[in-house]
């Protein structure tokens, strides 16, 4: 999987198309990511103690990796990611502008 936690991504498909945000979690076994402020779901929380109220909380849902693109730091657009081998090891490369280390 080419995306990592804390990457800035752009949503390409779905109701939140065009939105961007930071990756909060990555689930490589199911090829999904959680993006901050995108694909919000309502979760009902039960009261656990006496006198406490139940509540409805908004949480981010998972998005398929195919529906997001990494935002390049230089060209500020959603781009595909390639890899290049250097002396330091394997480095991610923007396929649009060729910037290394995105």
Image: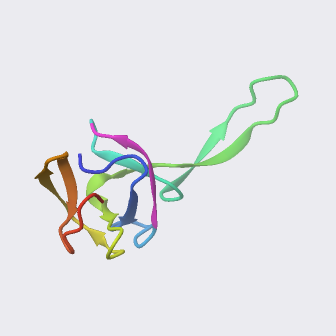
Is 74 covered by the magenta stretch? no
Looking at the picture, tell me which residue is in the foreground, 88 or 42. Answer: 88
Specify start and end residues of the magenta stretch as a single range.
20-28
Residue 47 lies, with reference to residue 64, above or below; the image says above
In the picture, the quarter occupied by the N terminus is top left
Q: Main secondary structure of the magenta part?
A: strand
- The residue shown at (54%, 58%) is 37
Q: Quadrant of residue 26?
A: top left
Name the residue furthest right: 51
Q: Which x, y percent locates residue 38?
A: 49, 59
In the rendering, at what x and y percent does residue 78 appear? 31, 70
Position of 32 with respect to 36 (left or right) is left
Q: Is residue 31 left or right of residue 6?
A: left
Vertical comparison of 9 with 48: above or below? below
Measured as percent of width and height from the top left, residue 4 is found at 34, 47
Instruction: In the displayed orientation, state which residue is furthest to the left.
Output: 85
Q: Which quadrant, please, contains the C terminus? A: bottom left
Nearer to me, 15 or 6? 6
Its colouring scheme is rainbow
């Amino acid at each position: 999987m080419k995306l990592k936690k804390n990457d800035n991504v752009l949503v390409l498909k779905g109701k939140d198309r065009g939105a961007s945000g930071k990756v909060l979690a990555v689930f490589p076994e199911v090829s999904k990511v959680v993006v901050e402020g995108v694909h919000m779901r309502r979760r009902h929380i039960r009261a656990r103690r006496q006198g406490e109220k139940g509540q409805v909380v908004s949480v981010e849902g998972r998005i398929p990796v195919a529906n997001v693109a990494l935002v390049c730091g230089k060209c500020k657009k959603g781009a595909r990611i390639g890899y290049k081998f250097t002396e330091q090891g394997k480095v991610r490369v923007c396929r649009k502008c060729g910037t290394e280390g995105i």
